[in-house]
């Protein structure tokens, strides 16, 4: 039974890293859903803003500058996932796409690697402590 254990623990390290990455992605997605819902509820509580947005949409069909302004307003009230990621780091820096996504990707992959590395070091330490001391 002890001969099978090392292979099993190596798989555990890999699965631990994968599950950490999946969990971090899920937390990001769920946080985005809450962020989007809060923004939509805020927009719904201000009906005057909805009227102004509809008017801006009609006017934006002829004017490029107004179209850009309309897109910004639309993303403010109905943010996309990259908008949420930019909002997350807005306290640190005002970065535009693709930097918030890169920052989040590094965060997610880093958490998975740190989890797997910690598990690996822990297993290695436990294995070394169970080996009999070498005598000369």
Image (cartoon, grey):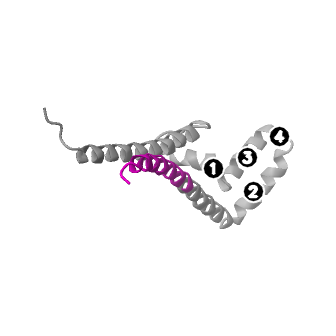
Residue for badge 3: 71
Query: Spatial distance from mark 3 to mark 4, Cα to Cα?
Result: 12 Å
Q: What kind of element bears circle 4? A: loop
Q: Position of residue 99 (x, y in %)?
A: 57, 36
The residue sitting at 68% across, 55% down in the picture is: 78
Q: Earlier in the sequence, mark 4 or mark 2?
A: 2
The answer to whether residue 76 is seen in the rendering is yes
- Return the mark for residue 52: 2
| In this view, 46 is above or below 99 | below
Residue for badge 4: 63
Front one among 117 and 10: 10
Query: Going by the image, does 43 lie left or right of 115?
Result: right
Q: What kind of element bears circle 1? A: helix
Q: Position of residue 133 (x, y in %)?
A: 18, 41
Which one is in front in this view, the residue at disc 1 or the one at disc 3? 1
Q: What kind of element bears circle 2? A: helix
Q: Which residues are magenta?
A: 1-26
Which one is in front in this view, the residue at disc 3 or the one at disc 4? 3
Q: Residue furthest bottom?
A: 45
Front one among 11 and 21: 11
The question of residue 8 being in magenta is answered with yes
Residue for badge 1: 81
| Label 2–label 1 contact, CB within 8 A | no
Q: Quadrant of the C terminus?
A: top left
């Amino acid at each position: 039974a002890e001969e099978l254990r090392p292979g099993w623990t190596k798989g555990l390290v890999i699965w631990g890293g994968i599950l950490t990455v999946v969990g971090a992605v899920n937390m990001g997605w769920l946080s985005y859903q809450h962020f989007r819902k809060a923004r939509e509820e805020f927009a719904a509580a201000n009906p005057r803003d909805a009227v102004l947005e509809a008017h801006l949409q009609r006017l934006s069909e002829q004017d490029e500058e107004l179209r850009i302004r309309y897109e910004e307003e639309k993303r403010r009230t109905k943010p996309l996932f990259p908008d949420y990621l930019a909002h997350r780091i807005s306290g640190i820096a005002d970065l535009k796409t693709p930097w918030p996504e890169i920052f989040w990707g590094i965060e997610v992959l880093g958490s998975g690697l740190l989890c797997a590395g910690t598990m690996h070091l822990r297993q290695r330490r436990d294995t070394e402590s169970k080996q009999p001391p070498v005598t000369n």
